[in-house]
Amino acid sequence: MQTLKIVKIGGNIINDEVALHQFLDEFALLKTPKLLVHGGGKLATQLSKTMGVATKMIDGRRVTDAATLDIATMVYAGKINKTIVGYLQSKQCNAIGFTGADGNTIVSKKRAVNPVDFGFVGDVIKVNPKILNLLLQQSITPVFCAITHDKNGQLLNTNADTIAAQLAIALVNTFKVELYYCFEKNGVLLDVEDENSLIETLNVAHYEHLKHKQVIYEGMLPKLDNCFNAIKSRVNKVGVGQPKMVFKTNSKYTKIEL
Amino acid sequence: MQTLKIVKIGGNIINDEVALHQFLDEFALLKTPKLLVHGGGKLATQLSKTMGVATKMIDGRRVTDAATLDIATMVYAGKINKTIVGYLQSKQCNAIGFTGADGNTIVSKKRAVNPVDFGFVGDVIKVNPKILNLLLQQSITPVFCAITHDKNGQLLNTNADTIAAQLAIALVNTFKVELYYCFEKNGVLLDVEDENSLIETLNVAHYEHLKHKQVIYEGMLPKLDNCFNAIKSRVNKVGVGQPKMVFKTNSKYTKIEL
């Protein structure tokens, strides 16, 4: 089977045009089939401010009301997604932008309103990989933003890390899938303040131990849950770290293991 | 060859949710391969106002500066395109949203700045139909918004009527193409105030005559130029009128002829 690299990039790259172009330049050169998933970045927050749409938070988590969903759809599926696709085209990488609604590729379910109503947020329930396989066979690079749909006409804001993991899992029957979560740190750190405290391999038992000791906490937990979900579901390789891990074989990052 | 219906809808349908859903309900039921092109509508103007981006006009035509292009990309490729795709999915029509950058399907050239600089406006120079043919064969419905790219990383605002005509022309080798321009009037009218003055068939000679007599003028000219461009380029059928012309065989509209 061919190798498929699925790369997720987040706000730290998207917010910095130089970093984004540097990343996309290398990504475009990858010879293997590839798929990009991008998060949001600060543009949506900026647009909310300009439009006078207040950011509602419950328990430190953003609530996606109708106005916020509109902004997310405009910024993620419109501005960011199409700018990335256009840039990749200029680098001879034939990309097509996707939300989960496009090709009915990712169906999600609006999160239950109990105990907290987070609004138009969707949890992935099904990935339909047929059209993605077809496009990947044609050397097309799908570029996903973090919008999905419920198949009943409702778009839903969805965690980009989860989208990357679910796409990876859905494609294991047709590709040897590698999944890379790029962010600003070297990987999973024993001390979040010390980039040299990198954990080079992290397995389930070690993860449970570090969770229990609260060495790993907050935002890293859902990301790592996605990583372990992927590696348990026959994704061939899962990495967390700086973007260079995707392109340079000798770079250090956290490799997720069973 | 199979028939492919290409339908272009404009602001009057997009601005009215009831009319839009009514149209999409019928469009989703079409048994033949189909492709939708949508214009903008008033949402972009509203967003420009909310964001305090002034609408610049030269000779009655809108200038697309960088801020306006961002808004067009967000509204056309984001909000409108994905809302339509999501709605079609809910009606069992498997749609994928496109700009011309996606799949490198439509390449355009930034309009020369002489004599007037209209900004980030692109004139179509090439359509690459391969990926569209592949998707149409899989019963996927492409949904195009009016954003293209120059293959050098620049997105460009492009006339939706031209996009529809150019897509139609690019697909004549693989389909028997029918092209429908839907708008609020019954078709081309001899008297713009009188819906009963419908011209049921319009050929090149008649069109030239009516242009000369200034019976047809302003906004209708570029639309009809696109129609005649299509019919001269082996598009099988071109119609201008109310959306019902696409769905009901006995409805009246203007049929374009050589």
Image (tube, coloured by chain):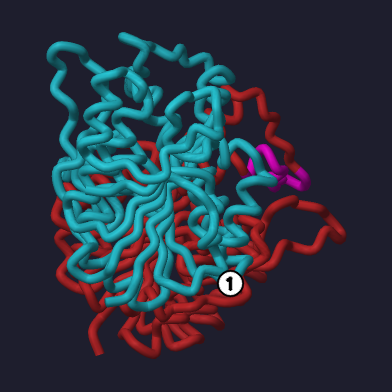
Chain colours: A cyan, B red
Which one is nearer the viewer's eye here, A163 or B195? A163
Q: Which residues are magenta?
A: B58-69
Q: State whether residue B199 appears in this view.
A: no
Q: Is residue B102 left or right of residue B24?
A: right
The residue lying at 65 percent from left, 23 percent from top is B52
Q: Is residue A169 left or right of residue B118?
A: left
Question: Residue beneath label 1, please?
Answer: A92
Q: Is residue B182 above or below residue A229?
A: below
Q: Indicate the position of residue B95 as horizontal and vertical percent values.
A: 27, 59
The residue lying at 28 percent from left, 73 percent from top is A134
Q: Indicate the position of residue B173 as horizontal and vertical percent values.
A: 39, 90
Q: Is residue B59 magenta?
A: yes
Secondary structure at numbered mark 1: loop
Which one is nearer the viewer's eye here, B232 or B186? B232
Q: Is residue A209 above or below residue A140?
A: above
Residue B221 quadrant:
bottom right
The residue lying at 86 percent from left, 59 percent from top is B115
Label 1 packing within 10 angstroms: few (<14), some (14-19), many (20+): some
Which one is nearer the viewer's eye here, A105 or A38? A38
Q: What chain does mark 1 sit on? A: A
Can you say which quadrant of the picture contains the N terminus of chain A?
Answer: bottom left
Which three-letter amino acid code belongs to the residue tagged 1?
Answer: Gln
Q: Indicate the position of residue B47 as horizontal and vertical percent values.
A: 54, 29
